[in-house]
Amino acid sequence: MGLHASCMRYFTGTDDMARQTRDRLLAARRLCLAIDLDETLVHANPVPEPGDAVAEPEQFFAVYWTERHRVALRPQVREFLAELAPMYEMCVSTQAQVDYARCVIAELDPTGELFGDRVCARVLADSPVTYKSLIPDMGGPSVALAVDDRLDAWEAGCTVLTVRPFRAFPNPPLPPTPGPDRALSCVAERLRAVYAEFYRRADLGEDPSVSVVVARLRQRALAGITIAFAGVLEPGEVLLGHRYVQCARELGAECVQDVTLGVTHLVVADGNPQRFPGITAVNLDWLHTAAETWSWPDEADFPPRPMQS
Ligand SMILES: [Mg+2]
């Protein structure tokens, strides 16, 4: 894959190309990983005017791109990339402009060992917004997946592991968030599990697909529980299709509209007073954490919260 202009529309790869890439990846016992830049690996902000109150991130560098920007590196970004490189052929897939992407990649991967020329970015700021896709150059959806802070940037059918957005430049400065940002090590753990499961199945003579492997691993997290929601859905809003419901179902949970016999968990919006005897109540972060870790978080760590003032 070359440095591709107007990213998503440029690719005219064929099924043949996807097959060839797939065969090459399998022969090398690797998979393909498309990684977003902004708010996934880095956070960029224009250089502040003198006197602007802006928090200073720990690690940042400057790029010139239309105007001078400061780009903060997400904690553990270099470790994340180095750890995954043996398992995944990595490429950058960004809605950002190609000149900016080049600057950021030069900082993250100065020798070109990690990304090579596998960059998918936009040529012009006013190029039409297109959805990102797992393109034939990546071997197709059976061997490729993506990491992004936004699921809605991707075409339906792509396997995307989401990561909490990384924002290093709160303006005005906010108090530091408690605890270190471990989002990348969380997603690395999931990617290791996907890789191990994919090649475990391949070694058994199966013809595995990343999308199926991810769906199965994800579904183990909350299998066997039944969730109702309190204050999360708008009045009159139906359960079906709601993003939290979709998320819970992907994690293997059943979701129901009303609290009935069999409900094990009540996911409660901040400030909502509803509780039911015998049903564990948790806040929405419990569900977010399950989605980020593909595990069953300890409910005791996520009690319902009063309305934040
Ligand atoms: Mg992003």
Image: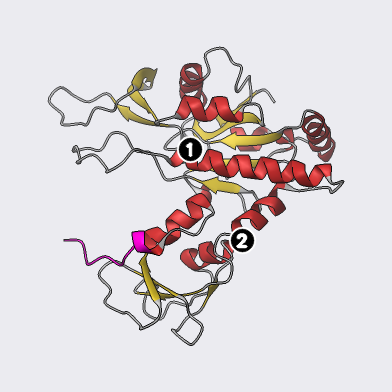
Image-quadrant location for residue 9:
top right
Q: Earlier in the sequence, mark 2 or mark 1?
A: 1
User: On the rendered structure, is 162 left or right of 24?
Assistant: left
Q: Could you tell me which residue is drawn at 37 percent across and 67 percent down?
A: 282
Q: Main secondary structure of the magenta part?
A: loop
Residue that badge 2 annotates? 219
Query: Which amino acid, mark 1?
Result: Ser
Question: Residue 185's mark?
Answer: 1
Magenta includes 16? no
Mark 1 residue CB less than 8 A from any atom of ligand 1: no
Percent from the top left, x then y, of residue 112?
59, 15
Q: Quadrant of the C terminus?
A: bottom left
- Can see residue 59? yes
Query: Which amino acid, mark 2?
Result: Gln
Disc 2 secondary structure class: helix
- Tell me if residue 204 comes above or below residue 138 in the rendering: below
Percent from the top left, x then y, of residue 34?
60, 36
Neighbours of disc 2 within 10 Å: few (<14), some (14-19), many (20+): some
Q: Quadrant of the N terminus?
A: top right
**Part of the protein shown in magenta:** 300-309
